[in-house]
Amino acid sequence: MTGNYHNKTVSLIGLGYIGLPTAAAFAMRKVKVIGVDVNQHAVETINQGKIHIVEPELDMVVHAAVTEGYLRATTSPEPADAFFIAVPTPFKGNHKPDLSYIETAAKSIAPVLKKGDVVILESTSPVGTTEQMAEWLATVRPDLSFPQHAGEQSDIRVAHCPERVLPGQVMRELVENDRVIGGMTPKCSEAAVGLYRVFVQGECIQTNARTAEMCKLTENAFRDVNIAFANELSLICDKLDINVWELIKLANRHPRVNILQPGCGVGGHCIAVDPWFIVDSVPDESRLIHTAREVNESKPEWVLSRIDRAIEQFLDRSPEAMNSGVRIALLGLAFKPNIDDLRESPAMHIALRLNERNRPLMIVEPNIESLPSALAQHHLVPLEIALSSADVVVILVAHREFECLPDLLRPNQQVIDAVGILKN
Ligand code: SAJ
């Protein structure tokens, strides 16, 4: 697929947090897009010009793309000139990557492939997955040649180009971020670069597929290790009676030091997952990455131990609460500030653990309208209500709505600040 993309069709397989914005980005450039998803509800919603996920600006763009006829969604793949696979790559037990979504997606597009098509894997993947995907395609289509057997002469071009956008800023980052594009051969890379140039204003840098796969895992492992450093510091400072937030601010005055922020754990479906893909493939060599994961995974339990201690301290001071119950307010449930996404959220983990212990909770999460069913017996309340009656206040997420907290807290409340809103 070369030259004028306005006469061509691209197909996005997987219309989630990455696939749908990418589909919309092509459609905004007046390229015909077929979006494919196994979720019938998602397909119907998109065909009505609406969206099934939360991401700023995406609704407007999808609405325009569908109304103008550039974007259409369906549940089964149709012929196109380029296919982008953007399906989940979670892990199974033992932190083993689950590539079954990629396998299913590859095998579903194989029957409609034709000579000259490009297939790009966007899902974050362990090293070697792009080659594996090309093998799955080749098994279904022995009549076509693929780069692992035919090299530069292959009928189908195959590449990996990992997505790198930050949830909440996807529409901007999709256009502005540089892209690392790893073809199985240089011609595969060139074909993929031509496609991304349709909407990417950042640089499109060519490499091979294995390096592109490792590059994405490296970026997220780098962030995980750096957050683990901050989280470990928070434990050390607690023992040494030092304010970790002040310490980090001071250390960051050094021109070559830039420590990240401790929190209640590392959430989301990327940073808490991707480093395991490295550890799984080279366990003996990835000791630091492995330990960082363990440090970050243990942080919610540490916060829980602090909540238990605060409850004990409150009861020591107010033994009459033994009968009436300690009133706990949890501030924030999302996996990071200013979003509504509760997936793999350490704050959610903490809430569920308190729920197991039958602790009644007042939960403040300004970004959602109702509590998830697992927490349905608790109360979703406005910040002021929670603070007016809570005995123990636990700050789990630094949402902008919580900036006014220092003025609202009452002196007799036990406060655990996992994210440094109070700072001192
Ligand atoms: N966090 C901290 N302290 C910090 C920064 C973050 O505790 O100083 C926590 C957050 O609260 C959250 C988690 O880490 O629970 C992850 O948040 P994030 O904002 O670091 O990253 P994600 O998961 O939203 O997006 C990441 C991004 N990767 C990098 O910044 C290297 C994004 O660019 C990727 O596209 C995305 O993963 C992905 O899809 O892989």
Image (tube, rainbow, N blue to C red):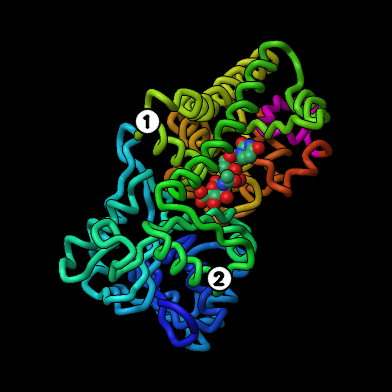
Is 359 located above or below residue 132 in the figure? above
Q: Is residue 419 magenta?
A: yes
Q: CA distance from mark 2 to mark 1?
A: 34 Å
Q: Residue at x 83, y 30 (%)?
A: 253
Is 121 on the left or on the right of 319, as rendered? Answer: left
x then y, percent, for residue 416? 67, 27
Quarter assignment of residue 243: top right
- The residue under label 1 is 282
- The residue under label 2 is 197
Q: Is mark 1 within 8 Å of ligand 1?
A: no
| Quadrant that contains the C terminus | top right
Is 258 located above or below residue 208 in the figure? above
Is residue 351 or residue 294 the one in the foreground? Answer: 294
Is 260 located above or below residue 175 in the figure? above
* Dot 2 amino acid type: Arg
The secondary element bearing badge 1 is classed as loop
| Quadrant that contains the N terminus | bottom left
Quarter assignment of residue 104: bottom left
Q: Which residues are magenta?
A: 408-424
Q: Quadrant of ligand 1?
A: top right
* Dot 1 amino acid type: Val
x then y, percent, for residue 114? 27, 76
